[in-house]
Amino acid sequence: MGGGIAMCFANAGIPVRLLEAQAGNLERGLEAIRRNYAATVARGGLTQAQADERLALIRPTLAYQDLAHADLIVEAVFEDIAVKEQVFRQLDQVAKAGAILATNTSYLHVGTIAEFTRRPQDVVGMHFFSPAHVMKLLENVRAPKTQPDVLATVMKLGKRLGKVAVLVGGADGFVGNRMLAQRSREALFLLEEGALPQQVDRALTDFGFAMGPFAVGDMSGLDIFWRVRQARAYLRKPGLRDCNLLDQVCEAGRLGQKTGAGWYRYEPGSRTPIPDPAIETLIVEHSRRQGIVRRTIADEEIVERCLYSMINEGARILAEGVAARPVDIDMVWLHGYGFPRWRGGPMFWADQVGLPKVLRAILGYQERFGPDFWTPAPLLDQRVRSGSGFNPGATVHPSIAC
């Protein structure tokens, strides 16, 4: 991630100091950057001279003091609040007055990280998406004390980097990952109840996603999601339903494409997911241990549970002011999470489906599964009662409703 972010700035002509704690990790990061540029040259996206020019803008270092003159510092360590604290306390010691300190955290509260410094007004979230030099979305995250000039700077900078920059609030998971958590939860519950990864993925690709959630997990590396799950274990409420299938898959050494097996298996040198009987056995045995009688699940239920849970959360995000407008949520999902563009984004699509239909389905799932995860958001209920959609003047178009 750090290497990809460095490339974003170098591609925009901005000099970068790339800091790592260990020389071996630093060299591996630089080698990955070199390979990325070499691949771009090979397919004709850059000349060798252009690639060399960009590489020359990235200067490696092992010393925090070398960041003393930076106008902007972007932290990209993994999601561990203790590590974030250590890094930001050191940055606070060396960064010049007025420098912007940004965190690339994807879940943690930016306001908490800001308080590790003596300059919380200069701390902001800049959540890049992997691979950072390719993905267009940039969630710029405001903390309670972030000053307006800092927000204006990172929004303008996002344009210079060629990103679709969306300003969001600093709540847990911001916009994209907060909604993604709902889909991920339901996808795993569907496995427990009778589906298999290939059915869930097929239902969502038929809807229009380029890849389903389990294939995406394998591509990204399941250990990334596993590490996040472990780091957030303290948030789980006792007695609340939880599925540990991801733990079991990772504990079996199946970390996705990089190990040749995850939710699927992969032939050497191939990225094509192949359904694996070993995973089916693992899931079926898990259901038996949980006392869950497996059943046939229709694709329609898969799509509804994965997407309506996201829309319900989106309504809460709007009510809390984490996103200012429905279109901000849609931009996040269109440019960062692969929501099919022709459907307009989850909140736009919900208006096309019709919020009364969405609410009826959520109430139905509440009756079946209880209120823990299926309590309608007050804003959704309010919009249905008022006869309006999420977007001003929204109407249902039967020709594209589904």
Image (cartoon, rainbow, N blue to C red):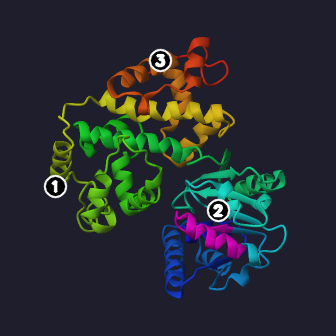
* Residue at mark 3 to residue at mark 2: CA–CA distance: 43 Å
Give the quarter of the image for residue 333: top right
Instruction: Tell me if 374 is positioned left or right of 103 in this view.
Output: left
Q: Which residue is mark 2?
A: 103
Instruction: Tell me if 253 is positioned left or right of 8 in this view.
Output: left
Residue kind at label 1, given as amino acid type: Ala
* Residue at mark 1 to residue at mark 2: CA–CA distance: 39 Å
Q: Residues within 10 Å of mark 1 (few under 14, many from 20)?
A: few
* Residue at mark 3 to residue at mark 1: CA–CA distance: 42 Å
Magenta region, main secondary structure: helix
- In reply to whether residue 88 is colored magenta, the answer given is yes
Q: Which residue is mark 3?
A: 399
Instruction: Tell me if 302 is positioned left or right of 286 in this view.
Output: right
Instruction: Evaluate whether residue 65 shows in this view.
Output: yes
Compared with 242, 34 (above or below) is below
Seen from the viewer's position, the closer of residues 258 and 146 is 146
Instruction: Evaluate whether residue 326 shows in this view.
Output: no
Q: Where does the image place residue 57, in percent across and percent down from the top left?
A: 68, 78
At a point 21% along the width and 43% down the height, the residue shown is 290
- In reply to whether residue 32 is colored magenta, the answer given is no
Q: Which mark is residue 79?
A: none
Query: For the residues carrying marks 3 and 2, which lies nearer the camera in this image?
Result: 2
Q: Which mark is residue 278?
A: 1
SS assignment at label 1: helix
The span picked out in magenta is 74-91
SS assignment at label 3: loop
Query: For the residues carrying marks 3 and 1, which lies nearer the camera in this image?
Result: 1
At a point 34% along the width and 57% down the height, the residue shown is 218
